[in-house]
Image (cartoon, grey):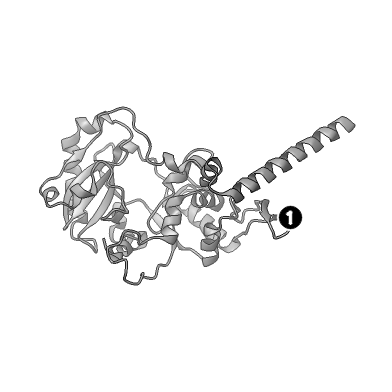
Amino acid sequence: MKKEQVVNCQFSVWYPIFKKHTIKSLILPLPQNVIDYLLDDGTLVVSGGDNNTQHNQTNNSDSEEEDIQAPEFPEFNSKVLKAINTLGGCVFPKLNWSAPRDANWIALNSSLQCQSLSDIFLLFKSSDFITHDLTQPFLHSSDEDSPNPAINYELVLRKWSELLPGGEFRCFIKENKLIGISQRDYTQYYHHISKQEAQICHSIQEFFSQHVQYQFLDEDFVLDVYRDSWGKVWLIDLNPFGEVTDSLLFTWEELTSGNSLSFVVCLYLDVTVQPSPCLSYRIPRDFVDLSTGEDAYKLIDFLKLKKRQQEDSEEEVEEEVRQ
């Protein structure tokens, strides 16, 4: 996987090519001050310019605590709200490559559905996938010694669609040939996949040969598709053909070996319980550091916070007694 292939898999590169075969989307340039905000570890609760006020605790050289207000982006917020309304009021957000799939645990409805910039910020600020896009987009590239191409970061808003996990599939394309198909959600067993394997493979192969093959800029890539209840296939995403992309029920050794070029197989998992691949992202890193004692400063901050909460609680009790 070369850096050029990563660049070609940006949403704004492939979307114009396959626009009529995928979900309606809008692309907004991401201002530098928003990028800086997303990468700022000091602000966890977000403001989307919709009159939300945030108070956060920071330690200065004198160990004094002060309240700060979260940054707001009124102009960008206006553009985002306009785009969301254009797309029906609810959207699925992502950056150039990744969506914050690892952060749905933090949303009140455990969903990636967003209706405001604040909703988007909450997911993005909590997502390691988004941080990867912003800081290490060319990780695992074979030409790592070459200069990194310039990236213009973008916020992608996709019209919200209720996609059933059992209809999502990942296709692996090598030398413009479909060499493997895996169910996208391998944590569950879907009876209809095993029952309709032949039809599913045929539908996906036909879609690939008619609408995708030889149309993309690269001959090696990974294609995410959705097959609806009527058997129609939709393009959902394109990803680089390499370790940066999850190989799901395959291994990259299988996919890159010469043997895998001679067959197409739809894999399904015949078990009922599997751990979610995103479970490891659901515990904030700060909690891990606290539990292991790896970061003494976080432990100190945590104890100060607990002490302040205890003092506030005692003050409230005293006020109630006086009343």
Q: Would you call the spot at circle 1 few (<14 residues within 10 Å), some (14-19), or many (20 or more)?
A: few
The residue to which callout 1 is attached is 64
Quadrant (top left, top right, bottom left, bottom right) of the C terminus: top right
Left or right: where 98 falls relative to 58: left
Residue 35: give x, y in percent of width and height: 51, 62
Report the residue at 45% width, 51% height from top.
128
Q: Residue furthest right?
A: 322
Amino acid type of the residue tagged 1 in the rendering: Glu
Occupied quadrant, residue 96: bottom left
Residue 179: give x, y in percent of width and height: 16, 49
Work out whether residue 193 or residue 298 is closer to the camera in this orientation and state it: 298
Report the residue at 49% width, 41% height from top.
283
Work out whether residue 129 or residue 286 is closer to the camera in this orientation and state it: 286
Left or right: where 54 falls relative to 101: right
Left or right: where 217 falls relative to 109: left
Whether residue 207 is visible here, answered yes or no, is no
Residue 286: give x, y in percent of width and height: 54, 46
Report the residue at 62% width, 59% height from top.
71
Q: Secondary structure at mark 1?
A: loop
Work out whether residue 97 or residue 81 is closer to the camera in this orientation and state it: 97
Occupied quadrant, residue 182: top left
Residue 10: give x, y in percent of width and height: 35, 61
Report the residue at 14% width, 48% height from top.
260
Whether residue 181 is visible here, answered yes or no, is yes
Occupied quadrant, residue 13: bottom left
